[in-house]
Image: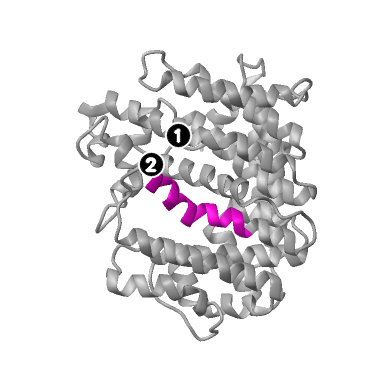
Amino acid sequence: MMGRVCVILKHPDDIYPLMKLKIAARHAEKQIPPEPHWAFCYRMLHKVSRSFALVIQQLPAELRNAVCIFYLVLRALDTVEDDTSIPTDVKVPILTAFHHHIYDCDWHFSCGAKDYKVLMDQFHLVSTAFLELGKSYQEAIEDITKRMGAGMAKFICKEVETIDDYDEYCHYVAGLVGLGLSKLFHASGSEDLASDYLSNSMGLFLQKTNIIRDYLEDINEIPKSRMFWPREIWRKYVNKLEDLKYEENSEKAVQCLNNMVTNALMHVEDCLKYMAALRDPSIFRFCAIPQIMAIGTLALCYNNIEVFLGVVKMRRGLTAKVIDRTKMMADVYGAFFDFSCLLKSKVNKSDPNATRTLSRLEAVQKTCRDSGVLNNRKSYIVRSEPRYNSALIVMLFIVLSILFAYLNAKRPNN
């Protein structure tokens, strides 16, 4: 509790966006459809990804249902791939046949843990909902599931050696998500069909950010480590990928981390081009919010030894600001400019990749400046300590806590 108070005192302008986020989350929870199979799908969506469940709610109903099922199908596929306890001779056939299983209302496979295990045990409910989607949505989801399953199966038996391997793996597990979403947007009649190249970059930028952020979780996976950082990069700094987490290798670990971040930055300009072409406001927000979260996460991870010690992520208040402020392309340019400035301020000229990092950041900043919309905006980066009355902030926090406690008490028990 005191930790939250301290964060609020340091960032008092987080309070209003956090309140709005809390209200939006409550509203989203009330939008659960009455049909049992659809109710299961949306409840699972809230459990496996609360942030995604929030941004998806603003999509039109038909498209929202298609995106919900698309996400859960791929999350289930990912659960099979991630479960290191499944023998390869069992896992590979499931991955390559998964696009058939989504048509089978009796199929399920027990794996994963916690909410993901529930998803897999009750997967027949997802299939039931899938079969109620329009034909064009079904075909798009089946196509991407087939291609992703085949790609995942390929990398079960193959390590990520080169940067080309890294890009290929990220294409299979995330770039294809970008292609699939573009197909769903087009099938809804709301957007033109985006190029595969730009759609792929949208996925790669998000996936590479996750791979960087999740280093420690992946390397400590039981019973077997999951290693996605390409050998071509990490072998320049250590003999084994797991060596990066040891204190004696801290300097080399940070240099390797900065190399990985620099690699991810190559996709930013493509992502900005993709988002600038979107017409539908709800689809735009759906796409833009995760991308801003990604550049913000990279800015926090860059040159940060904490990546090898625990979890590095944006504070909840800043996440709430991103969700609250992201309404048009000008907001995206502003956010990318701000976070690239933060990242640039952390670049040490002695870092082996400093020149490449700065070059990519300057290219991003030029794109944002050339948009002509950077003036008259709220910055995501507080450049000086705000002058707020601490006692007033504490009192406000207490009042809000009492209010939320009262609202929770008033909610009927299910």
Camera-near label (1 vs 2) is 2
Can residue 319 be seen here? The reply is no
Q: Residue at coordinates 46% horizontally, 50% vertically from top-left?
A: 170
Indicate left or right for 351 with 41 as reference: left
Residue underneath mark 1:
263
Q: Assess whether residue 171 is covered by the magenta stretch.
A: yes
State whether residue 178 is above or below residue 79: above
Which residues lie in the magenta part?
163-180
Residue underneath mark 2:
163
Question: Looking at this view, is 118 or 183 the one in front?
Answer: 183
Can residue 217 be seen here? The reply is yes
Whether the residues at callouts 1 and 2 have beta carbons within 8 Å, the answer is yes
Q: Assess whether residue 179 is covered by the magenta stretch.
A: yes
Sequence order check: which comes first, mark 1 or mark 2?
2
Q: Is mark 1 on a helix, strand or loop?
A: helix
Give the main secondary structure of the magenta stretch: helix
The crowding category of the residue bearing disc 2, from other C-alpha atoms within 10 Å (few below 14, some 14 to 19, many at least 20), is some
Q: Residue at coordinates 68% horizontally, 69% vertically from top-left?
A: 137
